[in-house]
Each structure stands twice: as C-alpha cells, then as structure tokens.
Amino acid sequence: MDSNMFHKRREKLDLFKAFRNKTVQVQEKPVPDDLYTKCPSCGSPILSTRFREMLRVCPHCGGHSVLGARDRLAATVDEGSFRELFGQMAANDPLHFPGYAEKLSGLEKKTGLREAVVTGTGKVGGYRMAIAVMDSRFIMGSMSSAVGEKITLLAEYAAKKRLPLIVFCASGGARMQEGIFSLMQMAKTTAAVERLAEAGCLYVTVLTNPTTGGVTASFASLGDIILAEPGALIGFAGPRVIEQTIKQKLPEGFQRAEFLCDCGFVDAVVPRGQLRDTLAQILKLHSREGR
C-alpha cells in the first residue's frame, strides 16, 4: 500500500515537471502604431481616440495642434448643412517652378484637398453663413492664386446673398512658387472684403496657428470681429526674422494670440472647444432674419 502511494506521488511529480518545462506559445497581438499621439507642445503621450475627441487639444498642457480643414468644418458647421463651393478650383504652375507640380499632386493625394482652403456655405447654431477654412497641411496654408481666388469668390457670393462670412486663417504667407501672382492676392482679397463691408455683411476671422505673412497683411486682419485660438502665432514676419533684423530680444509671448489680444489687435482668444458656441452667439446677435 505504501509502495502504491509513493508510485502515485511520483507520477504526479513527473506530470508537474513536464508541465513546468513545457513551453507555452502565447500569440502576441501587435500594438497599433497610432494608438498614442505625442503632443507637439509638451511631448505628453495622449490616447489617439481621446485626442481626436478633444479636437486635437492636449488635455495636459492645452496646446492646440493642427486641425485639418475637413475636421474643422465637422467641428464647427451644423451636421449636414455644409455645401462646398468652388471645390474644383486648384493651383496651377504659372512660373513652371521646378518640382511644384509634383508637390501639388503629392499633397492632393495626402490631404484629399485640391488647395489650401475649403470654401462653402452652411449653418452654425442654425444660422446661415459662408465659410472658408484654410489648411496648414497644404504647403503651410500658403496663399496661391487659387487660394486668393476662392476667398474672393466666396466674399462676392456672401455679399450677393447677404450672408455673414467666417474665415478660419492658417498660413505661412504667400506661396513663393507663384511669385508675384501670389502677392497680387493680397490686394484682390482685400478689395473683395471691402465690397462685402459695403454690402453690410458681417465678416469674422478666426486666426489659428500660424497666421503670418501676406494672409495676415490682407483678409485675416480685416474682420469686423477677430478671434484667435490660444497660443496662435500671428504676425507678418516671424519672431526670429524680427530679432535678427532689429538686433533685440522680443518680449515674452510676442506675436502670440494672448499678447495681441492685450494689445487690442485680437478681440478675443477662444479655446477650440468653445469656438462653435462663440460663433453661433455672434451670428445670433448679428442675424438679419433669424435662423
């Protein structure tokens, strides 16, 4: 009996050793590359789904990252109300600048845009308006002849239909590949905005990061109401260029939205999550016929 008991214990011990030495195959699931996003401002990791839900605003530092034109429209305009205008208009290559045509083709495939601005009409809070949204992913939102033409045509359309016009600005300035053709858009868009004012239509600009160069020196600065996102760089020449020119150190936060608001250039600095409600309130206060 004792021999049988020891025999059973030995069998159990052998089974335990065999199980312990057995290699268990565990199937590893790959971690998606885009599971987390690194905040460009503070470097903190953010769950990508949460980052998108927060409209690409960092929950740690409040930094406002680049928001594409289509995402901006989805976050601003009432669902199903947006109707694009002049969508087929695209940049050409008037100077036959080396590599420019290839760059435009590549960016169209990458961003799904034909140019650095999307224009159309829609509603915000139930109030009709015309809207243009610039996209800095397309050659830094630089102003080509096509961008200037789309802004001009939209301003003329708004004046004709007596609609308020909202423009989200994001630009590195004039597009160097088009030379003087780009610079001419400053005068053209300015004249269009003046005609909009003569028609008695409200004009609101929202300056996002960055808004610089010829865009700042033309239609971006002409709004009846000028809003800006927190931390947005706003100016003509960049701070480094200014420092190198005047050989002086600029004040802290120079050319940022908050600094310009204190100086009276910007009417209000509005966080991205509050922009839609703010614009709806502005449109309500200036509405001609209600919704």
Image (cartoon, rainbow, N blue to C red):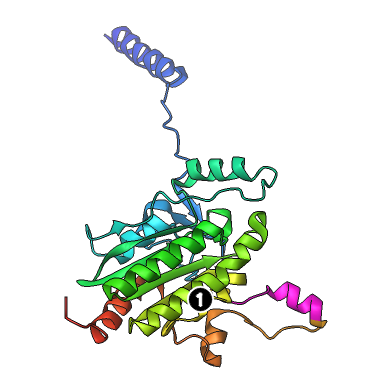
Q: Residue furthest left?
A: 290
- 59 vs 43, left or right, is left
Task: Report the front residue among 204 and 277.
Answer: 204
Q: Position of residue 4 (x, y in %)?
A: 29, 7
Count residues near mark 1 (Cα–Cα under 10 Å), then give few for <14, some for 14-19, many for 20+: many
Task: Report the front residue among 275 and 161.
Answer: 161
Q: Residue at x 56, y 73 (%)?
A: 187
How many marks are shown on the rendered structure? 1
Which stretch appears magenta? 234-245
> Is residue 252 within the magenta segment?
no
Q: Which residue has dot 1 on it?
A: 190
Q: Residue at x 24, y 64 (%)?
A: 78
Q: Position of residue 57 (x, y in %)?
A: 44, 65
Classify residue 59 by image quadrant. Answer: bottom left
Is 29 above or below relative to 277? above
Q: Secondary structure at mark 1?
A: helix
- 227 vs 159, left or right, is right
- 205 vs 237, left or right, is left
Q: Position of residue 264 (x, y in %)?
A: 52, 91
Q: Position of residue 130 (x, y in %)?
A: 32, 68
Q: Residue at x 39, y 17 (%)?
A: 13
Q: Residue at x 27, y 80 (%)?
A: 283
Q: Residue furthest bottom?
A: 263
Task: Report the front residue among 224 and 206.
Answer: 224
> Is residue 236 within the magenta segment?
yes
Image quarter of the N terminus: top left
